[in-house]
Image (tube, rainbow, N blue to C red):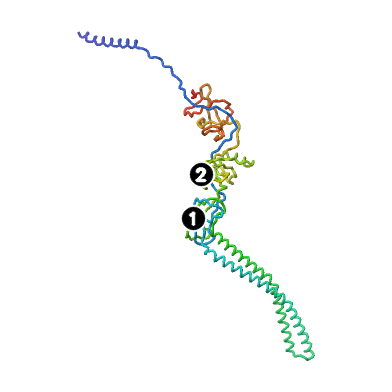
Amino acid sequence: MNKKKVLLPVLLLVLGIAGFAALKATRPKPPVVVPKEPVWRVRTVVVEPATLSPVTALNGRVESPEQTRAAAPGVGRVLRVSAREGQAISPGQRLLELDPRDFQPKVDQARGEVDELEAATASEELRHKADLDLLVQERKLLDFAAADVDRFEQLRRENFYSQSAVEQSRQNLTRQRITLRGRELAIADHQARMSQLRARLSKARANLDQAQLALQRSRVTASFAGYVAKVEVAEGDQVNSGQSLLTLYPASGLEVRAKLPATQQDEFLAAMRRGEHPKATAVVAGETLEFKLARSAGAADARGLDAFFVARRASPHLRVGELVSLQVARAPVADVVAVPYAALFGGKQVYRIEAGRLKALDVAVLGDAGGEAGQTGARLLVKSPSLKQGDVLLATHLPNAVSGLKVEVVK
């Protein structure tokens, strides 16, 4: 009885194992899955080498080399301000006026000094002319006095005249010599007195000119067509000599100061030494303006060299201090290819499609293509001896692009 109780569970276990083995042996086999290589759908661009001008994008600020700051010519009070910041001005237009009562008295005082010294100069000329005439008479009187002394001495020796009379004649002779000597000294000193008067007169005339100039400059007028950049005073303000009143700049001759990249500045400098002036364009308020490279700064820094691009014509949209983005055309380069930005990988590679797979090619990036490539959208100019006419390049920026990757071109 005990043996049956032991064998029955063992028998059931064996049967279960056998059934499981039979079911496992007779189960259906799943189909074998063959791995399939992924294919990326991409867009392409066809290589068409050409001679094109790379374009360098530069950001600069508008400046005016002829910007003018009107300053107060002296201490005074602002009488009238007719200009407003940003106002367009024309030549001869009065912009600001200081009170003339602060400047007119100085003009009158300086003119009075000039008149006084001119009269003194004329008086000295008349005095000198009279001295010359009197010199002749003084010499005649000296001769007469000397003759009297000789005659009186002769008469004294003959006892016809007293000794006191002789002494009196000698005194007259001495006084006449002194008078003649004084006259000769006055004549000799004439040139020195005239030089002194002329110097004082020149100084007085200079003071008069300065006072008249201050009066003239107390009325600020525009000398060119342009704009008011800044007004720094208001009517009734008290101003000091040299204090800034307002700032003006002409509408023509504006230029953009931009930093040339250190890697390209030698190219631009060489072009200017050859007498060439690279052209640039900028869109300001919807208007396309043309510029040309006129000159470079005298000193550079680690970021590059400042260059000055002069506007070819005046524009009401171009104002001093405005930030402008320039597109500067450089010297044309042969056998370059215009490609979309998306075609460049790692800043130095493009991928050519060969038999449905990618192949990496190293290229030199020359700059933007601008509008010269005849294509729509922003493009780069690249160059490589490996690029040939008709090559098909990847134009979709794949994050996992590597040589050998399989792609399918989207028509």
Q: Position of residue 310 (x, y in %)?
A: 57, 45
Question: Mark 2 Cα within 10 Å, few/some/many (few <14, many 20+)?
Answer: some
Cα distance between the residues tagged 1 and 2: 24 Å
Query: Quick check: 182 above or below 225?
Result: below
Q: Residue furthest bottom?
A: 159
Decide which of 136, 115 is in the foreground and name it.
Answer: 115
Q: Residue at x 47, y 57 (%)?
A: 234
Choose top left, top right, bottom left or bottom right for residue 52: top right
Whether residue 308 is visible: no
| Quadrant (top left/top right/bottom left/bottom right) for the N terminus | top left
Labelled disc at residue 160: none
In the image, residue 354 sits, relative to residue 271, either above or below, namely: above
Q: Which residue is mark 2?
A: 323
- Amino acid type for the residue under numbered disc 2: Leu
Q: Which residue is mark 1?
A: 232
Q: Is residue 39 left or right of residue 90?
A: left
Identity of the amino acid at label 1? Glu
> In the rendered structure, which disc, 1 or 2, sits on the residue that comes first in sequence?
1
| Residue 335, picture quadrant | top right
* Image vertical order of residue 81 relative to residue 290, above or below: below
Total of numbered circles in the picture?
Answer: 2
CB atoms of marks 1 and 2 within 8 Å:
no
Give x and y (percent) for residue 282: 54, 41
Indicate the secondary structure of the residue bearing disc 1: loop
Q: Secondary structure at mark 2?
A: strand
User: In the image, residue 60 lies at what x, y percent?
Assistant: 53, 43
Q: Position of residue 44 (x, y in %)?
A: 51, 27
> Can residue 341 be seen at all in this image of the molecule?
yes
In this rendered view, identify the residue nearer to me: 93 or 130: 93
Q: Looking at the image, which is closer to me, 75 or 180?
A: 75
Q: Residue at x 72, y 81 (%)?
A: 176
* Residue at image point 61% right, 65% down: 205
